[in-house]
Amino acid sequence: MDIHFDTQWTYQNVSSGWRTLALPFTPTHISHAEKGRLAPFGSDIEGAKPFWLRRLTQEGFTDVTSIEPNIPYIIAMPYNPEIYIDEYNISGTVTFKATDAEIEATPQELLPDEGPDYYLQPTYRRVAANDEIYVLNRNWWAEGGQYEGSVFTNTASQDVYCFEAYVKPKPGTPTRSAYAIDTRSANTRSVSQKNTTGIPAIGDM
Protein backbone atom coordinates (compact mmCIF):
# COMPACT_ATOMS: atom_id res chain seq x y z
CA MET A 1 0.00 0.00 0.00
CA ASP A 2 1.36 3.42 -1.00
CA ILE A 3 0.66 6.47 1.15
CA HIS A 4 1.77 9.97 0.19
CA PHE A 5 3.39 12.11 2.86
CA ASP A 6 3.28 15.81 2.10
CA THR A 7 6.25 18.02 2.87
CA GLN A 8 5.19 18.82 6.43
CA TRP A 9 8.06 20.20 8.47
CA THR A 10 8.94 18.66 11.80
CA TYR A 11 10.39 21.16 14.24
CA GLN A 12 12.48 20.46 17.32
CA ASN A 13 10.56 20.80 20.59
CA VAL A 14 7.35 21.41 18.60
CA SER A 15 4.80 18.65 18.08
CA SER A 16 4.15 19.09 14.37
CA GLY A 17 4.12 17.28 11.04
CA TRP A 18 1.89 14.50 12.34
CA ARG A 19 -0.75 12.62 10.38
CA THR A 20 -3.03 9.74 11.34
CA LEU A 21 -2.74 6.17 10.10
CA ALA A 22 -4.77 2.95 10.35
CA LEU A 23 -4.01 -0.15 8.27
CA PRO A 24 -5.84 -3.48 7.87
CA PHE A 25 -2.56 -5.43 8.10
CA THR A 26 0.80 -5.44 9.86
CA PRO A 27 3.45 -4.16 7.44
CA THR A 28 6.67 -6.17 7.41
CA HIS A 29 8.52 -3.76 5.11
CA ILE A 30 8.18 0.05 4.99
CA SER A 31 10.20 1.96 2.42
CA HIS A 32 10.70 5.15 0.43
CA ALA A 33 11.72 4.91 -3.24
CA GLU A 34 14.77 7.17 -2.82
CA LYS A 35 15.67 6.91 0.88
CA GLY A 36 15.27 3.15 1.26
CA ARG A 37 13.96 1.18 4.21
CA LEU A 38 12.11 2.99 7.00
CA ALA A 39 11.19 1.90 10.52
CA PRO A 40 9.79 3.46 13.71
CA PHE A 41 12.24 4.77 16.29
CA GLY A 42 13.20 1.98 18.68
CA SER A 43 12.82 -0.85 16.19
CA ASP A 44 15.73 -3.24 15.58
CA ILE A 45 15.81 -3.02 11.77
CA GLU A 46 19.42 -2.37 10.86
CA GLY A 47 20.06 0.50 8.46
CA ALA A 48 16.45 1.73 8.37
CA LYS A 49 15.75 5.47 8.41
CA PRO A 50 13.66 6.31 11.49
CA PHE A 51 10.25 7.91 11.84
CA TRP A 52 7.97 8.69 14.76
CA LEU A 53 5.05 6.37 15.52
CA ARG A 54 2.78 6.80 18.53
CA ARG A 55 -0.39 5.27 19.88
CA LEU A 56 -2.99 6.84 22.16
CA THR A 57 -3.28 5.51 25.71
CA GLN A 58 -5.12 6.74 28.78
CA GLU A 59 -1.90 8.53 29.76
CA GLY A 60 -1.54 10.21 26.35
CA PHE A 61 0.41 9.34 23.21
CA THR A 62 3.26 6.90 23.66
CA ASP A 63 6.01 5.66 21.34
CA VAL A 64 5.52 2.25 19.70
CA THR A 65 7.70 0.22 17.34
CA SER A 66 5.20 -1.60 15.12
CA ILE A 67 1.87 -1.17 13.35
CA GLU A 68 -0.97 -3.55 14.25
CA PRO A 69 -4.09 -4.09 12.13
CA ASN A 70 -7.11 -1.82 12.71
CA ILE A 71 -5.32 0.34 15.28
CA PRO A 72 -5.16 4.16 14.94
CA TYR A 73 -1.75 5.83 15.17
CA ILE A 74 -0.15 9.20 14.69
CA ILE A 75 2.89 9.07 12.43
CA ALA A 76 5.46 11.67 11.39
CA MET A 77 8.27 11.43 8.87
CA PRO A 78 11.33 13.61 9.62
CA TYR A 79 11.47 16.59 7.31
CA ASN A 80 13.51 19.66 8.19
CA PRO A 81 16.32 20.51 5.71
CA GLU A 82 17.64 23.14 8.14
CA ILE A 83 18.44 20.47 10.74
CA TYR A 84 18.60 17.01 9.17
CA ILE A 85 20.99 15.51 6.62
CA ASP A 86 19.21 15.09 3.29
CA GLU A 87 19.06 11.28 3.40
CA TYR A 88 16.91 11.45 6.54
CA ASN A 89 14.36 13.94 5.17
CA ILE A 90 11.36 11.90 4.05
CA SER A 91 8.57 13.22 1.82
CA GLY A 92 6.52 11.74 -1.00
CA THR A 93 5.32 8.17 -1.38
CA VAL A 94 5.97 5.65 1.39
CA THR A 95 5.16 1.99 0.72
CA PHE A 96 3.76 -0.23 3.47
CA LYS A 97 4.10 -3.87 2.41
CA ALA A 98 3.45 -7.25 4.00
CA THR A 99 4.73 -10.60 2.78
CA ASP A 100 2.24 -13.51 2.76
CA ALA A 101 -0.12 -11.50 4.95
CA GLU A 102 -3.64 -12.77 5.53
CA ILE A 103 -5.96 -9.80 5.80
CA GLU A 104 -8.98 -10.71 7.87
CA ALA A 105 -12.42 -9.35 7.08
CA THR A 106 -12.80 -5.77 8.22
CA PRO A 107 -14.58 -5.69 11.58
CA GLN A 108 -18.12 -4.37 11.41
CA GLU A 109 -17.07 -1.69 13.85
CA LEU A 110 -13.48 -0.49 14.23
CA LEU A 111 -12.69 0.14 17.88
CA PRO A 112 -11.12 3.45 18.94
CA ASP A 113 -8.18 3.96 21.27
CA GLU A 114 -9.02 5.85 24.46
CA GLY A 115 -7.00 8.82 25.72
CA PRO A 116 -7.39 11.12 28.73
CA ASP A 117 -9.84 13.48 26.97
CA TYR A 118 -10.95 11.81 23.75
CA TYR A 119 -11.11 8.69 21.58
CA LEU A 120 -9.02 8.19 18.43
CA GLN A 121 -11.25 6.44 15.89
CA PRO A 122 -9.76 4.62 12.86
CA THR A 123 -11.69 4.52 9.60
CA TYR A 124 -11.49 2.67 6.29
CA ARG A 125 -14.00 4.95 4.59
CA ARG A 126 -14.27 8.65 3.92
CA VAL A 127 -15.95 10.62 6.70
CA ALA A 128 -17.30 14.05 5.79
CA ALA A 129 -16.26 17.00 7.94
CA ASN A 130 -18.76 17.81 10.67
CA ASP A 131 -18.80 19.55 14.03
CA GLU A 132 -18.85 16.29 16.00
CA ILE A 133 -15.42 15.04 14.92
CA TYR A 134 -11.95 16.54 15.16
CA VAL A 135 -9.45 16.12 12.33
CA LEU A 136 -5.67 16.56 12.41
CA ASN A 137 -4.97 19.89 10.71
CA ARG A 138 -3.28 19.60 7.32
CA ASN A 139 -2.58 23.32 6.98
CA TRP A 140 -1.47 26.14 9.24
CA TRP A 141 -4.29 26.58 11.72
CA ALA A 142 -4.99 30.28 12.23
CA GLU A 143 -6.41 30.11 15.76
CA GLY A 144 -3.39 30.12 18.02
CA GLY A 145 -0.96 29.94 15.09
CA GLN A 146 -0.63 26.16 15.14
CA TYR A 147 1.76 24.30 12.84
CA GLU A 148 0.54 21.73 10.32
CA GLY A 149 -0.16 18.37 11.89
CA SER A 150 -0.19 19.65 15.46
CA VAL A 151 -3.84 19.84 16.56
CA PHE A 152 -7.10 17.98 16.09
CA THR A 153 -9.70 20.60 15.16
CA ASN A 154 -13.34 20.66 14.05
CA THR A 155 -13.08 24.14 12.52
CA ALA A 156 -10.95 23.34 9.48
CA SER A 157 -13.70 21.81 7.30
CA GLN A 158 -11.52 18.80 6.52
CA ASP A 159 -12.81 15.36 5.57
CA VAL A 160 -11.25 12.21 7.00
CA TYR A 161 -9.96 9.80 4.37
CA CYS A 162 -9.58 6.03 4.19
CA PHE A 163 -6.79 4.61 6.40
CA GLU A 164 -6.84 7.67 8.67
CA ALA A 165 -8.31 8.40 12.10
CA TYR A 166 -10.22 11.18 13.82
CA VAL A 167 -10.95 12.34 17.35
CA LYS A 168 -14.25 11.95 19.17
CA PRO A 169 -14.54 13.82 22.50
CA LYS A 170 -15.48 11.80 25.55
CA PRO A 171 -19.04 12.32 26.78
CA GLY A 172 -19.21 15.02 29.42
CA THR A 173 -15.91 16.68 28.52
CA PRO A 174 -15.90 20.46 27.97
CA THR A 175 -16.39 21.63 24.39
CA ARG A 176 -13.15 22.67 22.68
CA SER A 177 -12.26 24.07 19.29
CA ALA A 178 -9.13 21.90 19.17
CA TYR A 179 -7.07 19.25 20.94
CA ALA A 180 -3.31 19.74 20.79
CA ILE A 181 -0.99 16.76 20.42
CA ASP A 182 1.11 16.90 23.56
CA THR A 183 3.92 14.37 23.30
CA ARG A 184 6.10 15.50 26.19
CA SER A 185 4.93 12.61 28.35
CA ALA A 186 5.96 10.19 25.59
CA ASN A 187 9.70 10.78 25.91
CA THR A 188 12.34 12.15 28.27
CA ARG A 189 13.64 15.10 26.29
CA SER A 190 13.86 18.57 27.81
CA VAL A 191 12.51 21.61 25.99
CA SER A 192 16.07 22.95 25.71
CA GLN A 193 17.38 19.88 23.87
CA LYS A 194 18.82 20.69 20.44
CA ASN A 195 19.79 18.22 17.75
CA THR A 196 23.28 18.94 16.40
CA THR A 197 23.99 15.60 14.70
CA GLY A 198 21.84 16.04 11.59
CA ILE A 199 20.24 12.65 12.31
CA PRO A 200 16.63 12.59 13.61
CA ALA A 201 16.24 11.52 17.24
CA ILE A 202 13.17 10.21 19.02
CA GLY A 203 13.27 13.10 21.48
CA ASP A 204 13.29 15.84 18.85
CA MET A 205 9.55 16.27 19.27
Image: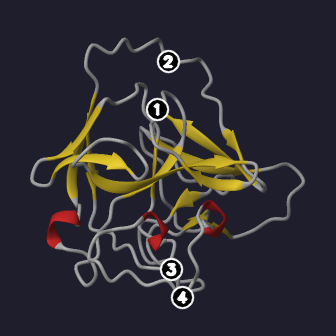
Query: What's the CA distance linking mark 2 and mark 1?
Result: 9 Å
Three-letter code, disc 3: Asn
Whole-number angstrom distance, CA of label 4 to CA of label 1: 39 Å
Q: Residue furthest left?
A: 34
Q: Which mark is residue 192?
A: 4
Are discs 2 and 1 less than 8 Å apart at CB? yes
Above/below status of 38 relative to 147: above
Would you say the residues marked 4 and 1 are in contact, meaning their CB atoms lie under 8 Å apart?
Answer: no
- The secondary element bearing badge 3 is classed as loop
User: Gap between marks 1 and 3, in whole Å?
Assistant: 32 Å
- Residue at position x 46%, y 43% from top? 65
**Label 1 Cα crowd, 10 Å radius (few <14 / some 14-19 / many 20+):** some
Q: Residue furthest right?
A: 172
Instruction: Report the number of numbered marks.
Output: 4
Q: Which residue is mark 2?
A: 106
Who comes first in sequence, dot 4 or dot 1? Answer: 1
Residue at which label 1 appears = 124
Label 2: few (<14), some (14–19) or many (≥20) C-alpha neighbours in 10 Å? few
Mark 3–mark 2 distance (CA, rounded to whole Å): 37 Å
Q: In the rendering, at what x and y percent does residue 3 appear? A: 28, 45
What colour scheme was applied to this rendering of the protein? secondary structure
Q: Residue sitting at 41 percent across and 78 percent down?
A: 11
Q: Which residue corresponds to the image point at 78% horizontal and 54% vertical from the top-left?
A: 116
Query: Do the numbered discs 3 and 2 sit on residues whose CB atoms are within 8 Å?
Result: no
Mark-to-mark CA distance, 3 and 4: 8 Å
Instruction: From the image, tell me which residue sits under label 3.
Output: 13
Residue 44, x across and y down, in percent: 36, 42
In depth, the one of 180 and 99 nearer the eye is 99
Q: Amino acid at mark 4?
A: Ser
